Image (spheres, coloured by chain):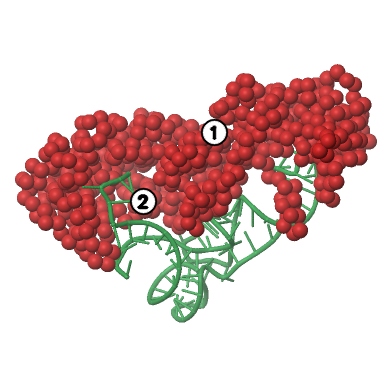
Chain colours: A red, B green
RNA sequence: UGGGGCGUAGCCAAGUGGUAAGGCAUCGGGUUUUGGUCCCGUGAUCCCAGGUUCGAAUCCUGGCGCCCCAGCCA
């Protein structure tokens, strides 16, 4: 349960209040929570909220948090997911210690408890088909009807259930059901299925079992076995709580856990549904589970989002029971906030435009001192080579600039950051009229970027020495979906953005950028935060744009377009 | 429609009968060798209607709206 330097202290919420009260009143003597993923997909940012909640509460109340895989449906579960889930939780900064469990560890116990229910006349084997069971379930307004097999003798139930276990019956032919109340207004209580026959290989138990418990029959009892005191889950399980409690009350379980529900996270421009995420991957809409556009933990990691930023984000959105949709901007803010503090600054030019300083000596190089991180003096400085020919950003020059454009233009002087003031004296174009080169003069008195006469150019540009530029591919990312509420008007896949990824070739970066380790995010000054992609090699550097910097100039331009 | 929840600013969210925190976003302004960061300023009478009370977002009544449930998924 370690949370290395979590910036904003977790504020309280209704769940923490319940936990505190339970402790205060002696209802529980220690706090045990659990994070219970089903290994049928990768973890996403919604899970991060739950993980932070469960591990956070355990740590704050000096308790413990278990990692328990809810692996009761072998048809959808895979070892790959078991592995990725553990890696992602660790990366997020949480530790379950020795408390790693699997619901499948409890299959023997659960089986015994099922037998116990049969013995006490509270469960029976039903021969109805899935369709027939559905037909007997009734509707929201009409009660269900009892199955003709509901009053089977205990011995017959015992025998049949035993034979289900032995594999005598094909999938779907028989189930074990709890005998509760077919007329209950809560549909979950209309004789829920406890066990189904599934001749499937389980990632953990192999072919030992051919009957598997349903979620409802496994979850609460697993909590009880582990001594979980507060079983925190999402709102859709609220109607299951009576059933959760029913099992706890009707079985000789070793403890009495309590289920508490909270609202799951929703994000604008994002889909957090495993069903959809699996399709995005399988249908090739993205590069994989860890595509930088995916809201998965592995995707966010590949995108360059620091774990701390994700933790800060889930800490600032709060925990409640009201359905809500958080604006992605809040996530982006939390990430920028961390990155601004820790990311080292570098120069990189995405769309290079040649700039030649005509009065600068040919062949000579100067090493300019550049600050690594203005927010962190301990990050020190570095040397950046400066030469007669440079590359600057195409967007930083306009031949006929609008009033609020503060960058380079014919006859105008700007500062080259950490270097000199330069003035544009001429523009060179190719046959088609495209600008291919800028001629400038520099003021030798402004070395380092300050003028002795106090002149202050309106603009400061980043640049790269043409002699020592390292080529790189840069991938620009944007929201995966084009609207804040994907799928709100029809097919969600039709809302997939067509420009969520833009791959730029021929970008030029500072030589030091070749050494950025995987997992570190740096700032390309004036552009944004970038990190090496997993595809990056020494021969072919590849950077992902984590997030752009807040850009008031872009905002002004957009407004101008709108007003015009 | 039966059951279970929820409803405080554009978004998230405090508030637990005493006169509406905070964050994000927005829009102004200041600082600035990143049009970044930072700093300052900017908005609500709490779904609606009645009622109780000296006093209600908080209590009561009645409406309205939204979400979840009819898998041998979790």
The residue at the point 72 percent across, 30 percent down is A347
The residue at the point 71 percent across, 45 percent down is A551
Tag 2 subunit: A
| Above or below, comparing residue A50 to residue A354 in the picture | below
Q: Is residue A262 left or right of residue A368?
A: left
Q: Position of residue A173 (x, y in %)?
A: 17, 46
Residue sticking out furthest to the front: A431
Q: In which quarter of the image is the C terminus of chain A?
A: bottom right
| Above or below, comparing residue A382 to residue A213 in the picture | above
Tag 1 subunit: A
| Disc on the earlier residue, 2 or 1 | 2
The residue pinned by badge 2 equals A260
The residue at the point 48 percent across, 38 percent down is A284
Q: In this view, does A183 lie to the left or right of A10?
A: left
Element on which disc 1 rests: helix
Viewer can see residue A1: no
The residue pinned by badge 1 equals A302
Q: Position of residue A376 (x, y in %)?
A: 68, 32
Same chain for mark 2 and mark 1? The answer is yes
Find residue A131 and name its label: none
Q: Quadrant of the N terminus of chain A?
A: top left
Q: Which of A58 and A406 is in front in this view?
A: A406
Q: Residues within 10 Å of mark 2 (few under 14, many from 20)?
A: some
Question: How far separated are the C-alphas under marks 2 and 1?
Answer: 33 Å
| Above or below, comparing residue A51 to residue A193 in the picture | above
Q: Position of residue A410 (x, y in %)?
A: 89, 40
Element on which disc 2 rests: strand
State which quadrant residue A431 falls in. top right
Tag count: 2
Q: Nearer the viewer, residue B47 or A32?
A: B47
Q: Position of residue A465 (x, y in %)?
A: 78, 25
């Amino acid at each position: 349960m370690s949370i290395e330097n979590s910036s904003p202290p977790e504020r309280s919420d209704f769940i923490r209040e319940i936990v505190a009260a339970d402790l205060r009143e002696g209802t529980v003597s220690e706090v045990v929570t659990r994070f219970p993923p089903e290994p049928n997909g990768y973890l996403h940012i919604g899970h991060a909220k739950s993980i932070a909640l469960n591990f956070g509460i355990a740590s704050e109340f000096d308790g413990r948090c278990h990692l328990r895989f809810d692996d009761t449906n072998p048809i959808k579960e895979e070892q790959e997911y078991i592995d990725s889930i553990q890696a992602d939780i660790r990366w997020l900064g949480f530790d379950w210690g020795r408390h790693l469990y699997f619901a499948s560890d409890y299959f023997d116990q659960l089986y015994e408890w099922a037998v116990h229910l049969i013995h006490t006349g509270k469960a029976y084997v039903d021969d109805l088909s899935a369709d027939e069971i559905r037909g007997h379930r009734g509707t929201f307004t009409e009660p269900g009807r009892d199955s003709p097999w509901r009053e089977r003798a205990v011995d017959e139930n015992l025998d049949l259930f035993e034979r289900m276990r032995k594999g005598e019956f094909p999938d779907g032919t028989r189930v074990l059901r709890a005998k509760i109340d077919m007329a209950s207004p809560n549909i979950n209580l209309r004789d829920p299925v406890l066990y189904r026959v599934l001749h499937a290989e389980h990632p953990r138990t192999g072919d030992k079992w051919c009957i598997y418990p349903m979620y409802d029959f496994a979850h609460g009892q697993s909590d009880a076995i582990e001594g979980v005191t507060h079983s925190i889950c999402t709102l859709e399980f609220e109607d299951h709580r009576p059933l959760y409690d029913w099992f706890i009350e009707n079985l000789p379980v070793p403890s009495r856990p309590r289920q508490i529900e909270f609202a799951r996270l929703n994000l604008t421009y994002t889909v957090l549904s495993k069903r959809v995420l699996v399709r995005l991957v399988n249908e090739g809409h993205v590069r994989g589970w860890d595509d930088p556009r995916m809201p998965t933990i592995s995707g966010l990691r590949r995108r360059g989002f620091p774990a701390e930023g994700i933790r800060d984000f889930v800490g600032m959105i709060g925990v409640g029971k009201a359905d809500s949709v958080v604006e992605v901007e809040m996530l982006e803010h939390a990430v920028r906030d961390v990155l601004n503090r820790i990311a080292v600054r570098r120069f990189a030019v995405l769309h290079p435009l040649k700039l030649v300083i005509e009065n600068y000596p040919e062949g000579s190089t100067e090493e300019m001192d550049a600050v690594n991180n203005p927010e962190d003096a301990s990050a020190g400085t570095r040397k950046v080579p400066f030469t007669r020919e440079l590359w600057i950003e195409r967007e930083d020059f306009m031949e006929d600039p609008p009033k609020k454009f503060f960058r380079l233009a014919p006859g105008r002087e700007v500062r080259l950051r950490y270097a000199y003031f330069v003035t544009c004296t001429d523009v060179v174009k190719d046959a088609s009229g495209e600008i291919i080169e800028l001629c400038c003069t520099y003021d030798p008195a402004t070395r380092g970027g300050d003028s002795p006469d106090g002149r202050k150019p309106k603009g400061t540009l980043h640049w790269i020495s043409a002699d020592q530029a390292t080529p790189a591919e840069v991938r620009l990312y944007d929201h995966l979906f084009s609207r804040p509420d994907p799928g709100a008007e029809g097919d969600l896949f039709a809302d997939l953005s067509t420009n969520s990824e833009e791959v730029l070739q021929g970008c030029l970066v500072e030589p030091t950028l070749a050494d950025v380790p995987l997992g570190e995010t740096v700032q390309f000054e004036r552009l944004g935060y970038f990190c090496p992609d997993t595809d990056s090699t020494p021969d072919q550097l590849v950077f992902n744009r984590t997030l752009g910097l807040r850009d008031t100039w872009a905002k002004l331009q957009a407004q101008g377009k709108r007003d015009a």
